[in-house]
């Protein structure tokens, strides 16, 4: 189609995105960012659930929807109707990848499961995203980010020690699952180039959520109990975290022993702390965290943030301000990097769209298409790929298929 860009790595790859909400759409967006042609299938009336979540943009989009659906086309099909299922199968014949996150068994029931798609496109890379292991006893359980954050132990490692378990500020499990899924699809496409064989990629939110626990998870296994929560501090590096200066918060990350010595001598004017045998090594600082931190907090709280940032930078210690979200998005750093763009919008006039974070050969990957209005590509996609004329499209619309 016209939006393919031959300079992008996935130009020529076509993706049929049957997913909705977050993990699946995130996966499709990643592939779209790298140049794939992504065709998003949505219900004709309501579209993706997230078109009704959060702040409205235009008539059919929201900020939530837009965050996961750039670089896609939207076509509307009621998959409860056999004519719509046949259209999906016809499209699948011309696609390289299918993504779906229906409830377990839902795709198969509609006639759009892996084996059914494989019958029309034998080398398809087909990605199923579910809440839990498709081969296990919980296969049929619906998957929700917040539930998995609780079950995977993520809420137990987040927040302050004296506060209840805390969820992440964003749907981290959904987002990681989307990224992991895109990685697996890319590996399967690479393999297909060599073997000509497709794959059924199976991803579960719980599996990905558990992976996010990372070093915390392995420490829990070593200790055979939950590691303590440190809030904005680091579990094993001291001092490292968010600290209050005299006039506001800042981030200080003292990553090694040499930095700690400079921090004591050049930033907080406390050479005695650098000379104290208890604090010579990071392991020692961790063992004597409370004694050390009481001294550091007092010194930081008596100095201005500007002075501390100046001294920290001069000493070569990583540091930064703690900005509000709007401040961060509109900061000179974000503007200079071109990280948020304004795209034309047929109803709202314009809308903000975040750009892909990837750079290839020094160039940031482009926003080729703003997040689509519901069904904006139905006519063009079905006419160009399947040869459906105006009369047939009008007939399908009258039947409620489109």
Image (spheres, rainbow, N blue to C red):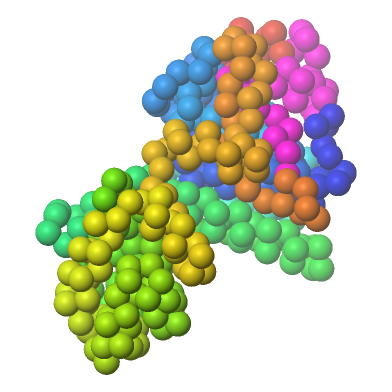
Residue 207 visible, this orientation: no
Picture coordinates of residue 214 (x, y %)? 40, 70
Quadrant of the rendered image containing residue 282: bottom left
In this orientation, which residue lies closer to the viewer: 360 or 11? 360
Residue at horizontal 29%, vertical 46%? 247
Quadrant of the rendered image containing residue 342: top right
In the image, residue 332 lies in the stretch drawn in magenta: no
Q: Residue 366 vs residue 159: left or right?
A: right
Residue 220 vertical position relative to residue 12 in the rendered view, above or below: below
Q: How many marks?
A: 0
Picture coordinates of residue 199 (x, y %)? 65, 60
Residue at horizontal 67%, vertical 18%? 344
Residue 120 vertical position relative to residue 192 in the rendered view, above or below: above
Residue 308 visible, this orientation: yes
Q: Residue 29 vs residue 105: left or right?
A: right
Quadrant of the rendered image containing residue 29: top right
In this orientation, which residue lies closer to the viewer: 212 or 263? 263
Of the 4 image quadrants, the one containing the N terminus is top right
Picture coordinates of residue 156 (x, y %)? 23, 61
Furthest-bottom residue in this view: 277
Residue at horizontal 33%, vertical 51%? 304
Furthest-left residue in this view: 162
In the image, residue 382 lies in the stretch drawn in magenta: yes
Magenta range: 365-392
Q: Residue 281 vs residue 121: left or right?
A: left
């Amino acid at each position: 189609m016209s939006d393919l860009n031959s300079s992008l790595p996935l130009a020529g790859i076509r993706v049929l995105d049957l997913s909705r909400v977050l993990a699946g759409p995130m996966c499709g967006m990643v592939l779209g960012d790298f140049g794939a042609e992504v065709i998003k299938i949505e219900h004709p009336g309501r579209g993706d659930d997230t078109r009704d979540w959060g702040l409205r943009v235009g008539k059919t989009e929201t900020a939530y929807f837009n965050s996961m659906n750039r670089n896609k086309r939207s076509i509307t099909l009621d998959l409860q109707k056999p004519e719509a299922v046949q259209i999906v199968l016809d499209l699948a014949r011309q696609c390289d990848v299918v993504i779906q996150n229906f409830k377990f068994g839902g795709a198969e029931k509609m006639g759009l499961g892996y084996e059914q798609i494989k019958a029309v496109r034998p080398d398809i890379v087909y990605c199923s995203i579910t809440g839990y292991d498709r081969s296990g006893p919980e296969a049929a359980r619906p998957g929700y980010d917040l539930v998995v954050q609780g079950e995977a132990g993520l809420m137990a490692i987040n927040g302050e020690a004296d506060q209840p378990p805390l969820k992440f500020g964003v749907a981290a499990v959904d987002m990681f699952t989307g990224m992991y899924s895109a990685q697996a699809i890319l590996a399967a496409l690479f393999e297909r180039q060599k073997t000509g064989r497709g794959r059924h990629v199976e991803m579960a939110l719980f599996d990905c959520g558990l992976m996010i626990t990372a070093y915390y998870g392995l420490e829990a296994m070593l200790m055979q109990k939950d590691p303590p929560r440190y809030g904005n501090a680091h579990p094993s590096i001291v001092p490292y975290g968010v600290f209050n200066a005299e006039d506001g918060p800042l981030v200080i990350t003292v990553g090694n022993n040499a930095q700690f010595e400079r921090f004591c001598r050049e930033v907080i004017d406390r050479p005695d702390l650098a000379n104290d045998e208890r604090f010579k090594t990071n392991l020692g600082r961790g063992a004597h965290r409370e004694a050390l931190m009481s001294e550091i907090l007092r010194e930081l709280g008596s100095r201005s943030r500007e002075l501390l940032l100046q001294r920290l930078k001069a000493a070569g210690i990583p540091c930064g301000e703690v900005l509000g979200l709007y401040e961060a998005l509109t900061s000179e750093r974000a503007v200079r990097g071109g990280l948020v763009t304004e795209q034309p919008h047929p109803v709202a006039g314009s809308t903000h769209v975040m750009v892909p974070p990837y750079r290839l050969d020094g160039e940031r990957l482009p926003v080729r298409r703003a997040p689509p209005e519901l069904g904006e590509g139905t006519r063009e996609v079905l006419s160009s790929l399947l040869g459906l004329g105006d009369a047939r499209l009008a007939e399908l619309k009258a039947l409620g298929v489109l």
